[in-house]
Image (cartoon, helix red, strand yellow):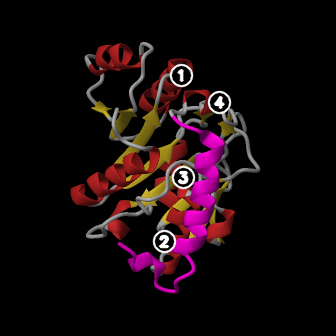
Amino acid sequence: MIVAGIPVRNKLCYTAPLIESLLYGDDIDEIWLYDNGSTDLTKSWAEHKIQYDERLKYKNATDMRLYEMWNHMITRAANIGDVKLAVLNNDIRLPLMALKTMADNMGEYKIAAIDINKKSFQEINNVYPETISWKERTGHAFMIDADFWKGQNFAVHPHLIWWWGDDDLFRRCESRGGKICRMIGIGADHAESASDSEYNGNKWRDIELDRVKFRNIWSSPYSYRIL
């Protein structure tokens, strides 16, 4: 089963084209749209779209922080069973069949990051997983083998707020013995920081808080067990 999980807050101008491309230009089973309190037409658009394609699932995530949404998605997918979960920013564009191709080529890897050296308009070819370390993570588009997280309390430390959760997720995976890769041949376009204006908080303060928390979390050799 292939699922795309997309946390959003407004910016339907990005979200709608991404969802359309996944529904009709890829081979996925479901899209989970986590709406963090949008005040634009996101909810009404999604409700209308669901009438025509039930693969789109809408979740009211108004009271959830970003990494709380990530953890919820990952736990939800792990409880289903054999799920490849793509966690995606809404401000990206992917090539046709990107997620199906990633899922088909993940093999033993537990997280597959997008190839940052390719663009979405470039043809998918010569696809293969290249082993990377957590420091080479890509936070705006990656795929998880959800079974790897089954029974875990979280995949991203719940004290993290906004910026360092992808670092924590990839490092936590690696610390638990999970292999990480970059999926060579599958690129994406990313409108850098396009959704930052929708952040409900003091972005730079929270980034600094996360930096300190991340360093404190990983000062222990048993950090992946921290509750």
| Circle 3: element type | strand
Q: Which residue is mark 2?
A: 173
Residue situated furthest right in the rendering: 117
Task: Point out the stretch of residues depicted in magenta.
Answer: 201-227
Which is nearer the N-term, disc 1 or disc 4?
A: 1
What amino acid does circle 4 point to?
Answer: Ala
Relative depth, front residue between 29 and 219: 219
Q: Which residue is mark 4?
A: 194
Which is nearer the N-term, disc 2 or disc 3?
A: 3
Measure the C-alpha gap from mark 3 to mark 1.
Answer: 21 Å
Q: Which residue is mark 1?
A: 11
Q: Which residue is mark 3?
A: 142
Which is nearer the N-term, disc 3 or disc 1?
A: 1
Mark 2–mark 3 CB contact (< 8 Å): no
What amino acid does circle 2 point to?
Answer: Cys
Answer whether residue 149 is visible to the viewer in this image: yes
| Circle 4: element type | loop
Residue situated furthest left in the rendering: 80
Measure the C-alpha gap from mark 1 to mark 4.
Answer: 9 Å
Measure the C-alpha gap from mark 4 to mark 2.
Answer: 28 Å
Mark 1–mark 4 CB contact (< 8 Å): yes
Q: Is label 3 or label 4 in front?
A: 4
Q: Position of residue 6 (x, y in %)?
A: 44, 38
